[in-house]
Image (cartoon, helix red, strand yellow):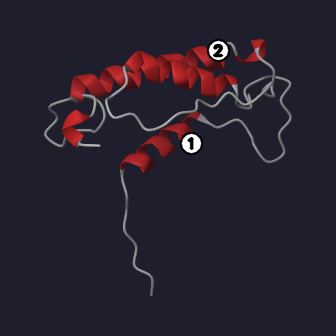
Amino acid sequence: MKRSNSPEAGFIDPSGANTEAIRDLAEDVLDQLLGQLETAEDRSPLPDESTAPTGTIPELPRSQNDLLDDLETIVAGSMNPAHPGYIGHMDTMPTTVSVLGDWVTSSHRRSTTIC
């Protein structure tokens, strides 16, 4: 896929030219995530079935709404550790700091030297 064919928020422009598009996407994802967590007790702690979207890598960008719809589908088919009845010995509910830490970690890489 050519980068020039990617959606405006597909990559973070180092010059900051698409900051508003990135912010809009991040806010939409955060709003959706918070909405899912606020209603966690209304969903089962375990998914009924896997609902992962299938398909191929598209040639052209998909709309932000399509991506958010897929995210909703993925969450619906995932475990729900925020449910009050969820009992997880290995998979606990993530803390806010760990979610934010994952976000920072995924956007920055640190090289290490193995001696």
- The amino acid pointed to by label 2 is Glu
Task: Tell me if residue 71 can be seen.
Answer: yes
> Would residue 79 appear left or right of 55 to someone viewing this image?
right
Q: Residue at (63%, 31%) from the top-left corner?
A: 52
Q: Mark 1 points at which residue?
A: 98
Q: Residue at (77%, 23%) from the top-left corner?
A: 83
Q: Residue at (72%, 31%) from the top-left corner?
A: 50
Q: Nearer the viewer, residue 79 or 82?
A: 79
Q: Which element is circle 2 on?
A: helix
* Quadrant of the rendered image containing residue 23: top left
Above or below, 88 relative to 71: below
User: Which image quadrant: the C terminus?
Assistant: bottom left
Residue 56 at x, y = what percent? 48, 37
Residue 110 at x, y = what percent? 37, 63
Q: Mark 2 points at which residue?
A: 38
> Would residue 71 appear left or right of 62 to someone viewing this image?
right
* Quadrant of the rendered image containing residue 74: top right
Q: Residue at (68%, 22%) from the top-left corner?
A: 76
Above or below, 87 relative to 76: below
- The amino acid pointed to by label 1 is Ser
Q: Which element is circle 1 on?
A: helix
